[in-house]
Image (cartoon, rainbow, N blue to C red):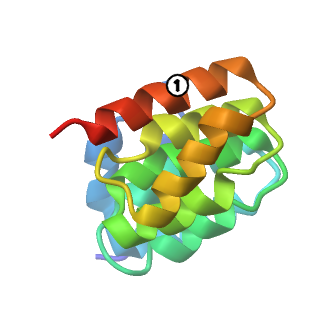
Amino acid sequence: MAVTMQQVLAVLNVDEPAYPRASQLGPDALPHLEALIDGPDPMLASKAAYLAGLIPGDRSLPLVKRAATRPDPRIRIAAAATATNLAEAAADEVLLSLASDRDLGVRKTVVRSAPSKASPALRARIDEMSRQDPEQSIRQISSELLQRMQQP
């Protein structure tokens, strides 16, 4: 069954989308999500980006990566947040691309979304953030994450 833009909008045009249920729209929703990510409404784009990360398959990653480059930080935050739903290598790729973002909220979401068994590259970036991020709160949560990563 083909998914329409109206179906996608129906699940996203609410204050709190039911993302697990919305993800059941499946890969047929991805072209519509891509259009919304590129669209003029940053709140709708952020919801579309998050939902894209919940849809299984390789076709989701390009949309999340695209969202990670959008000018509005709300969309980049959604990309970082949904990285937890991606395969490990894909999540690393998205999180590494956002770890140096100029927006505090994006960097904070990167740290909060990083898995406790992060890749060596992501772990090194989080270590750098714990020592050099200009924002004290990012240094703090990065240090806490590194401590959790060292626990067995």
Viewer-side residue, 42 vs 87: 87
Query: The C terminus is located in which quarter?
Result: top left
Q: Is residue 3 visible?
A: no
Viewer-side residue, 78 vs 152: 152
Give me the residue at 42% from left, 33% from top: 145
User: At which x and y percent is residue 46?
Assistant: 62, 45
Give me the residue at 65% from left, 50% from top: 99
The amino acid at mark 1 is Ile
Give me the residue at 36% from left, 62% from top: 86
The answer to whether 106 appears left or right of 145 in the picture is right
Viewer-side residue, 3 vs 149: 149
Give me the residue at 84% from left, 52% from top: 71
The answer to whether 58 appears left or right of 123 in the picture is left
Using a 10 Å C-alpha cutoff, classify the residue at mark 1 as few (fewer than 14 neighbours), some (14 to 19) or many (20 or more): some
User: At which x and y percent is residue 90?
Assistant: 43, 70
User: At which x and y percent is residue 69?
Assistant: 75, 62
